[in-house]
Image (spheres, grey):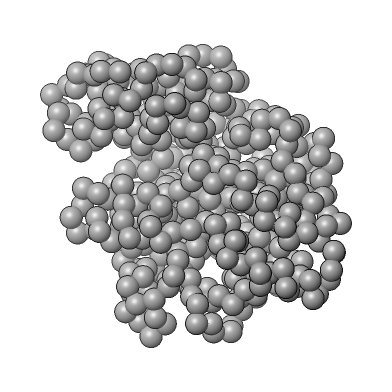
Amino acid sequence: MQTNLAPEFKGTHDGEEAEAILRKCVHCGFCLATCPTYQLLGDELDSPRGRIYLMKQVLEGAPVTRKTQLHLDRCLTCRNCETTCPSGVAYGHLVDIGRKIVEERVQRPAGEKTVRWLLKAGLTSPLFGPAMKMGQMVRPLLPAALQAKVPAPGGARAHRWPTKAHPRKVLMLLGCVQPAMMPNVNSATARVLDAAGIQTLVADGAGCCGALRTHLGDTEGGLADMRRNIDAWWPLVDGLTSQGRVEAIVMNASGCGVAVKEYGHALAHDPAYADKARRVGELTKDISELLPDLMPALQSRLGRSRPGATSAMRLAFHPPCTLQHGQQLRGGVEKHLGALGFDVSLAASESHLCCGSAGTYSVLQPELATQLRDRKLQNLQPLQAEVIVSANIGCIQHLQSGTTTPVRHWVEVLDDALAH
């Protein structure tokens, strides 16, 4: 697909990248079959192919309207289309560029602007934790819609962090909302790694990975988050402290994993950070990518503690889009959990489709998000699982809002098995 860039985009970083991406698109339409919003709405403009045409028109200087903005807003950025695309179109990068341009040119209604500002400022604020605690205290009194966004408080174990030092060390991003909403995911990750002889370190200055602001059209805010994290991590990445050098930066939220792995791409145009960003991206691993190395130690621990005990619980695994499409990691979690004795299955139908969480999408597009959630839970229901497991906080919270079946991170279930 050829494009004729408008003068204001020629020679710019965004324009050159967008043009290179557009050249790859052959307009074949394979992506329509795997686009969640097209499946629901049946509108060509709510498909990757349609949105690509809209963004092409914007880059060629066509007027930008609220309708263009609406169709880009409806995109989940699940990147399922990238898995399907025979030409390797980097749609996720293109839609970030498109959203940035449209955000600059189309004035949003005051209500939308306020909600988006609150999400960007509130979810990354130091006040989010206290606000979440307050919400949990009055949770039974909250309206159902708010209750769905406020998880029950974690128990004492959620704050129990291993204290043993190990020669092998990794760095972990706690995330912006996870420590307040689901603290047990982080501590369970540290305990599982500890059981395999790996110490987990945290850099206090790190925060949001940058995805939240970037996907809301605030590209500069997202880049600032990335630079802050790199600055916080660098002493441990480069071995400049008494702790030595970490062997990996571990992510237990697959959405953050996608963002951090792509720091090198996002900051390639910044001479002060390009090399550091590339190195940080190369060091970043989803916790599931460490499982092959951890298997001998974990199998030994599980075998000594309770032989065969883990296989009694039926698990249904929902692989987040950010894991299977964004990071292109498929099959590893269920394969290795199975080798550890767990009875884990995928939905027989549509396991590749998004659950509707998609970061802030479930807040900004609640109707579509709820339809996708219910569709996902309907496909998981035949498995008759005792627990649904996933690998991203957004998916876990969103799915839990529609079912009484417990929804947890798979690392929490593994941690529980190791504790018994």
The residue that appears at 39% across and 80% down in the rendered structure is 244
Name the spot of residue 233 as percent of width and height, x first.
Answer: 37, 68
Q: Residue 41: where, in percent of width, then height?
A: 57, 17
Give the residue drawn at x 25%, y 34%.
Answer: 17
List x then y, in percent, for residue 114: 43, 39
Instruction: State whether residue 157 is above or below residue 344.
Output: below
Residue lying at 76% horizontally and 70% vertically, measured from the top left: 302
What residue sits 42% from the left and 19% below the top?
Answer: 49
Towards the viewer: 83 or 269: 83
Horizontally, is 85 left or right of 178 in the view?
left
Return the x and y of residue 89 as percentages of the image width and height: 38, 30
Q: How many marks?
A: 0
Q: Is residue 161 above or below residue 174?
A: below
Give the side of residue 348 with respect to residue 255, left or right.
right
The answer to whether residue 155 is visible is no
- Does 125 sit above or below residue 370? below
Does residue 195 sit above or below 348 in this rendering?
Answer: below
Is residue 393 visible to the viewer in this orientation of the structure?
Answer: yes
**Screen quadrant of the C terminus:** bottom right
Q: Quadrant of residue 218?
A: top left
Quarter of the image with the N terminus in it: top left
